[in-house]
Image (cartoon, rainbow, N blue to C red):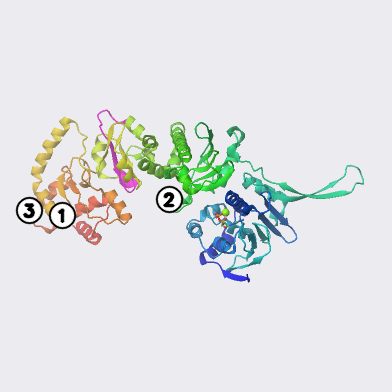
């Protein structure tokens, strides 16, 4: 192969520029990324060799070697893993910008706070971290089981890279960093040791380094002896195999960072061994903050699966339902065959049993967290509540448990502090029959909704469903503890005692008689917009509001459907007027004076616009609305 020079894709180049010029903190993580790549490469050849022994070539022990050359000022990370063909080099670290590159760029540009090197592994672009400390990087690599010669990739991180043939004859990869000025500390044994033990201790293959020692003999006059020996820098412990009592919190946390690419400590560790029909070890983590990719449809997710200590894959989605995708960790089972394929995994009885066990365990852990340490559960729920709600929708089997995990702000909560359904029910006054809720686009909107007025009067609490997914939750969650959940902006609300109702109906009848002309006028004027005009029993202060049918689409749902680009026929709602509001007698006087007056039409438009605004819906003709308000002000 002749030497070829290639240009990086624009996005890769932008990424490199940022890596070189903007990431200052924790430059040492480049080593974690390169060792992690080396370890992945060994995992892969180990796995492929299960079905093709030839790949192993001459029998040798798995090894990742770090070599520091102080004279040349280079640091080399070598592995005897899977290696890459020329085409793979180009695909993985050359021209092709993967989706992670773009997202990392966006994230860096959007949020300077995250201009933190530790972040880079999350985006599948860890290799480029090398350029933080090196002004030239070479990769010599040979693919296991391929007849193609080895390749040498060279780049200074500025615009181009070259590819040419190289000499390596055994499978594996050497990544050599020509260190930038001022980065010589990474050539020191103690620094390499420190970084390896801090970030890569749990790597399951030996990370070795040649250590040179000079010793003098015991007797005076003995000559100095210099010996160089390969020493292993990491402890290689599969910490999930150990007993929980043997693992320190730091070890748990460090391993978490390795499997999750998160840089904050986890909220909770679940480490256990299951025995019985299915035996396995699980080390699971509840993160304390949601990862960037929690809602990306194409994000890589899933647990790391090991079978009898051999790494199988790090994205086993079949071990957990989608709504528990935020869990990170390892499952190691000896009940699965080693050569298990993805297709088999999907439909395997052992996997199904493990999954059931994990789900039960995790849900129990969450329930405990909520019961015992609400101060920890609440921030967790803020981060992951939305995915728990997906579970309410998806997981019929565990529906009851999941419902207990839900929290909502309410009309009685201070500063939007959420409450559980259980606590809400415990606070319900005796005569309250249903659980009331209001869906809205924001907490502020919910808090100021006119729909709350009559309930406030009764001192009934209303739950605020302000997460878009809550609309879906309400479709499943129709009842709790034998009580119906009732949307206060849909249909009639039944909050009055029989006597009150009678009195109200009486009053309503006479009001309806009094305001007949007003109702008829508005009905006719707004006929295209609304379904009906009615006098309201739910308002005390506001003049009007819009109410959906019992089964109809309310304002919030309409907004969500539009946001998802769903075509929908326009939905008409009922306009309810407050018969006790001072605007009513005024309107009546106008109707009586001149039912064809233009001002009357303007007032009807204003009332309707107000109702739309308070529920957070757009008004159709904003210019017209502005004109009307000005006109009103001029008088
Ligand atoms: P990630 O490891 O998240 O995929 P990286 O930027 O660290 O992202 O690496 C990009 C890709 O380059 C890897 O997925 C792998 O295919 C390839 N690669 C990197 N280092 C090695 C290595 N030592 N041996 C084999 N392939 C490697
Ligand atoms: Mg990597």
For marks 3 and 2, the one nearer the N-term is 2
The quarter of the rendering in which ligand 2 is drawn is bottom right
Q: State the residue at coordinates (53%, 64%).
A: 14
In the rendered image, residue 436 lying in the magenta stretch gets the answer yes
Q: Earlier in the sequence, mark 1 or mark 3?
A: 1
Assess whether mark 2 and mark 3 are in contact (beta carbons under 8 angstroms).
Answer: no
Magenta segment includes 417: no
Q: What is the CA distance from the residue labelled 1 to the residue labelled 3?
A: 20 Å
For mark 3, what is the residue? 593
Q: Residue under circle 2?
A: 295
- Distance of label 3 from label 2 (alpha carbons): 59 Å
Residue 310 visible from this viewpoint = yes
The one nearer the camera, 252 or 494, is: 252
Write down the residue under mark 1.
Answer: 526
Q: Is mark 3 within 8 Å of ligand 1?
A: no
Residue ID at (73%, 47%): 231
Q: Is mark 1 within 8 Å of ligand 1?
A: no
Splitting the image into 4 quarters, where does residue 474 fall?
Answer: top left
* Quadrant (top left, top right, bottom left, bottom right) of the N terminus: bottom right
**197 left or right of 6 in image:** right
Q: Residues within 10 Å of mark 1 (few under 14, many from 20)?
A: some
Residue furthest to the right in view is 221
- In the image, residue 412 lies at what x, y percent? 33, 37
- Left-right relation of 400 to 627: right
Q: Position of residue 577 (x, y in %)?
A: 17, 46
Q: Is residue 450 above or below residue 499?
A: below
Residue 185 seen: no
Extent of the magenta region? 427-446
Determine crowd level at label 2: few under 14, some 14-19, many 20+ residues with C-alpha closer than 10 A: few
Q: Which mark is residue 57?
A: none
Report the mark closest to the observer, 1 or 2: 2
């Amino acid at each position: 192969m002749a030497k070829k020079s290639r240009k990086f894709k624009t996005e890769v180049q932008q990424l490199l520029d940022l890596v070189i010029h903007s990431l200052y903190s924790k430059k040492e993580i480049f080593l974690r990324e390169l060792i992690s790549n080396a370890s992945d490469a060994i995992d892969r050849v180990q796995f492929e060799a299960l079905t093709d022994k030839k790949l192993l070539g001459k029998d040798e022990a798995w090894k990742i070697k770090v070599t520091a050359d102080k004279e040349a000022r280079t640091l080399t990370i070598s592995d005897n893993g899977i290696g890459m063909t020329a085409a793979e080099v180009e695909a993985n670290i050359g021209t092709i910008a993967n989706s992670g590159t773009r997202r990392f760029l966006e994230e860096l540009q959007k949020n300077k706070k995250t201009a933190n090197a530790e972040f880079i592994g999350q985006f599948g672009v860890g290799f480029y971290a090398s350029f933080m400390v090196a002004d030239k990087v070479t990769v010599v690599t040979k693919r296991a089981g391929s007849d193609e010669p080895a390749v040498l990739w060279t780049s200074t991180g500025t615009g181009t890279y070259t590819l040419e043939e190289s000499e390596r004859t055994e499978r594996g990869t050497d990544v050599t960093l020509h260190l930038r000025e001022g980065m010589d500390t990474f050539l020191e044994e103690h620094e390499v040791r420190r970084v390896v033990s801090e970030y890569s201790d749990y790597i399951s293959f030996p990370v070795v380094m040649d250590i040179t020692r000079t010793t003098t003999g015991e007797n005076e006059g003995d000559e100095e002896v210099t010996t160089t020996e390969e020493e292993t820098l990491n402890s290689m412990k599969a910490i999930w195999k150990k007993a929980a009592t043997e693992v320190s919190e730091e070890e748990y946390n460090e391993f978490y960072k390795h499997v999750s690419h998160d840089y904050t400590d986890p909220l909770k560790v679940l480490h256990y061994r299951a025995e019985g029909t299915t035996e396995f070890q699980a080390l699971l983590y509840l993160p304390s903050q949601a990862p960037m990719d929690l809602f990306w449809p194409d994000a890589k997710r899933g647990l790391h699966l090991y079978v009898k200590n051999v790494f199988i894959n790090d994205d086993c989605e079949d071990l957990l339902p989608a709504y528990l995708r935020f869990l990170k960790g390892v499952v190691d089972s000896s009940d699965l065959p080693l050569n298990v394929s993805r297709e088999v995994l999907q439909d395997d009885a052992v996997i199904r049993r493990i999954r059931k066990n994990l789900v039960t365990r995790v849900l129990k852990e969450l329930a405990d967290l909520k019961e015992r340490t609400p101060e920890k559960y609440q921030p967790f729920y803020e981060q992951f509540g939305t995915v728990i709600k997906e579970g309410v929708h998806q997981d019929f089997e565990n529906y009851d448990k999941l419902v207990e995990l839900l929290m909502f702000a309410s009309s009685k909560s201070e500063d939007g502090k959420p409450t559980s359904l259980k606590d809400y029910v415990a606070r319900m006054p005796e005569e309250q029959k249903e659980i009331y809720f209001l869906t809205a686009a924001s907490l502020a909107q919910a808090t100021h909704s006119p729909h709350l007025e009559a309930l406030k009067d009764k001192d009934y609490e209303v739950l605020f469903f302000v997460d878009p997914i809550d609309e879906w939750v309400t479709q499943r969650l129709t009842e709790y503890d034998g009580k119906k959940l009732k949307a206060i902006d849909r249909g009639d609300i039944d909050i009055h005692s029989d006597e009150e109702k009678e009195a109200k109906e009486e009053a309503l009848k006479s009001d309806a008689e009094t305001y007949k002309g007003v109702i008829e006028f508005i009905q006719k004027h707004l006929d295209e917009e609304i379904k009906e005009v009615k006098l309201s029993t739910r308002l005390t202060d506001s003049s009007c509001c819009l109410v959906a049918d019992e089964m109809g689409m309310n304002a919030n749902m309409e907004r969500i459907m539009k946001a998802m680009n769903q075509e929908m026929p326009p939905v008409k709602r009922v306009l309810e007027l407050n018969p006790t509001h001072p605007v009513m007698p005024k309107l009546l006087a106008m109707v009586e004076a001149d039912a064809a007056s233009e001002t009357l039409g303007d007032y009807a438009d204003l009332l309707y616009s107000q109702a739309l605004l308070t529920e957070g819906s757009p008004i159709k003709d904003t210019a017209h609305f502005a004109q009307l308000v000005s006109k009103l002000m001029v008088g």
